[in-house]
Image (cartoon, helix red, strand yellow):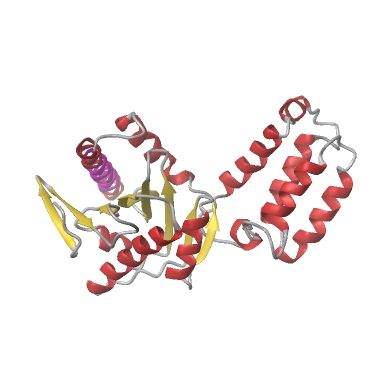
Amino acid sequence: MKTRTGIVKIVQPAMIFETTYPGRTSIGQEIVSFGTSSWRLTLNNEDFLVIDNSSLAQVYSIHALSPILKGTIPALYTLLPDKNKSTYVSLFNEVRNVTVRNNLLLNPKFITLDFERGAINALKLVFPNSIIKECNFHFNHCLFKKLQELGFQKAFYEAQDNDLITVKSLYQRVAALAFMPLDKIDELWCNIMDDYSDIPNIVLFFDYITEIWIDNSEAMFEKQLWNYYNFDGARTTNSVEGWHHRLNSQVAVTNPNFYFFVKKLRSDYAYNVATIKQVQRQQTTATKEDICE
């Protein structure tokens, strides 16, 4: 099915998949998105979106909150040819345009995602009114990973709780900056560097934090992206980890056959529908029991 003229509906028993081709990022490369026939309604007037970059090759997903499940549910699956900003712009523009063409509104207040520079810049362009936040779990992971790379892993695990100046307590204080007032972070970071300057070779970690997270003009990820002070939205993308793990287990390979992958998406959709129906039945049963009492 080779078309780039709009939305192609692939009708399957008990469900509909929609395939969109927003445009080519280069010759021979297309963006292919899948969603149920109601995915537009799922995103309509949604305040919170969680976006996940799967470990599967170039699989990108957009999740919306499900009041029934009290968590997130995948609204759109996408296969991307690359991770360039232009590719993400094409994807997000088409998602927004499809909702507009159907007289729906997609203007989320909050969007939480992993540390993907191209996606972040694209979201700022397509959804300028949204508050974009990077996953706090992945922020902490980045800190710990850097300590490992610099050879501090042993010192981290051997740190004693009663010792005030350790690699572990340094990690904890840096991680806590994500919940401090924005206008206090620079001062707090200077205090942290002063307190831990006696740790051998720690200056390399200081340089990393400053260059990647703190520097007001040159930081790779500005403080507003990873700071959660007075923030009411989702702090992490952990709500999609259950789905993420389930899909990875079903597919089991990083570069699956296209039709095999689509089959697994159908299975994932069926699982989500069955889970929602089960929760609804349980809620209905509980309500009836309350009435009888």
Instruction: Give whichever of 161, 18 is nearer the camera.
Output: 18
Tell me which residue sits at (40%, 35%) in the image.
245
- Please name whichever residue, 193 or 116, is drawn nearer the observer in this view of the structure: 116
Q: Residue at x 29, y 34 (%)?
A: 256
Report the span colored magenta: 267-285
Give the percent coordinates (x, y) of residue 113: 49, 53
Residue 259, located in which quarter of the rendered image?
Answer: top left
* Rendering quarter of residue 157: top right
Q: Position of residue 24 (x, y in %)?
A: 30, 59
> Is 123 situated left or right of 265 in this image?
right
- Is 72 left, or right, of 269 in this rendering? right
For residue 58, what is the image quadrant? top left
Q: How many marks?
A: 0
Examine the structure image and report whether residue 147 is included in the region drawn in magenta: no
Horizontally, is 189 left or right of 276 in the view? right
Please name the residue shown 67% across and 58% down the image: 219
- Depth order, front residue of 159/148: 148
Majority secondary structure of the magenta segment? helix
| Residue 199 % position (x, y) | 86, 36
Left or right: residue 282 compared with residue 72? left
Residue 229 image offset from top left, x and y in percent = 65, 60
The vertical placement of 271 against 127, above or below, is: above
Residue occupying the far front of the picture? 27
